[in-house]
Image (cartoon, coloured by chain):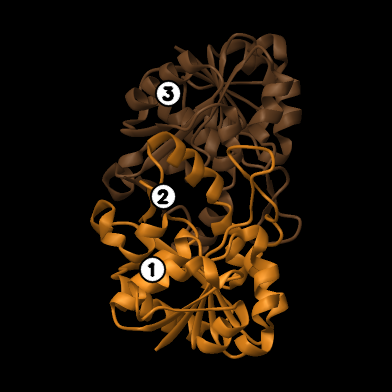
Chain colours: A brown, B orange
Amino acid sequence: MKVGILGSGMVGQTIALKLGKIGLEVMIGTRSPEKLADLAAQNPGLKVGSFSECAGFGELLFNASKGDASLDVIRSAGKENLAGKILVDIANPLDFSHGMPPTLFVGNTDSLAEQIQRILPETKVIKAFNTMAAAVMVEPRSLAGGDHSLFICGNDTEAKVRAAALFKDWFGWSDIIDIGDLSGARATEALLPLWIRLSMKLGPGAIQFKIMR
Amino acid sequence: MKVGILGSGMVGQTIALKLGKIGLEVMIGTRSPEKLADLAAQNPGLKVGSFSECAGFGELLFNASKGDASLDVIRSAGKENLAGKILVDIANPLDFSHGMPPTLFVGNTDSLAEQIQRILPETKVIKAFNTMAAAVMVEPRSLAGGDHSLFICGNDTEAKVRAAALFKDWFGWSDIIDIGDLSGARATEALLPLWIRLSMKLGPGAIQFKIMR
């Protein structure tokens, strides 16, 4: 399977390297391919391209760009390149302009995932992985033995079932909770303020949410 | 110890009855004391009064009123009656006017708890218990054997330490996480949209957050 990762920061690189390691064909999409020359040299299988090349290449895509750049990245990727495909949106609408902890630039009655879906009406947008550190996304067992929850939501049920099966297969996720349609992203993006406060207190990236029932 | 409970709904009654059962003196404050005649008759120790009588009676107070009524209730209770005391705010700023799931009428850069604190500058406002069902607040072991988290925040460190010790003693809480000053209420009030969606899916009140580390 070919996977495209839109965004070349720490999150995008972590996902790209993990998927490459388990044998998938991966391309990172970036505004500045030349900056990833070293990474590509060290990982011979890893492809690097523009956002639109990446979107055209991937059969399934991740949006791993920074939240405040995501809408521009998605437009650059091109909705024709993403039509009919699953896009896993893991970005958060964080606004650091007033210092730490950040606020959210969209929320309550809308979400970043829904903004992306409106730009890409023919794409199956799924919100997932935005409530944890990158290392935990791809190695859930690295924290508390994997005993914690992954929230997913999206408007296309079949796409969610397929994505959840892939997340289980690729990364070893067990407790995947479907919270409904894509408006659920309002609820999971709203976890970030608490996640960041707890990370500042208990250690960066060292915490995860688990839903007890 | 004398405890006042502002608000006579299900949450207020649950806390009042539990605290009465363990031997504390409890008064429920309500707009309509006559409506609680049956409850008072069935629970001889339980006192019922106006919001200001309740605020004057309690050495420690709970705000268990509905979020959209809380500021009015607090003003009726009287800031002079609450000065120097701990007020545990468990209300949520839920707006049901657009249907289910509700939105929040304050958030992101402010919170209901901070609005209350601004009305009561001499009161030690602590946000706690707003992320769970009433039955779980007073009997944490009733869900997953008590293996889940209680978030507290507030501006007065000594008051938080004292309140956490009381919550442990009264209800049996073990995992109490201090998330910092009262602006942390922005983060815990923001959990409600996810809590409500999960309750709609997995069963009302039957879920709780646990922070894994």
Q: Secondary structure at mark 3?
A: helix
Q: Identify the residue at image location x=42%, y=67%.
A: B38
- Residue position for label 1: B176
User: Residue B49, position in %: x, y?
Assistant: 54, 79
User: Residue B63, position in %: x, y?
Assistant: 55, 71
Residue nearest the viewer, comparing B106 with B177: B106
| Disc 1 and disc 3 on one polypeptide chain | no
In the displayed structure, does residue A213 sit left or right of residue B48? left
Residue nearest the viewer, comparing A180 with A90: A180
Q: In the rendered structure, the residue with mark 1 lies on which chain?
A: B
Cα separation, mark 2 vs mark 1, equals 16 Å
Where residue B161 sits, quadrant-wise, is bottom left
Q: Identify the residue at image location x=56%, y=34%.
A: A184
Q: In the rendered structure, the residue with mark 2 lies on which chain?
A: A
Q: Is residue B37 above or below residue B105?
A: below
- Residue position for label 2: A208
- Residue position for label 3: A20
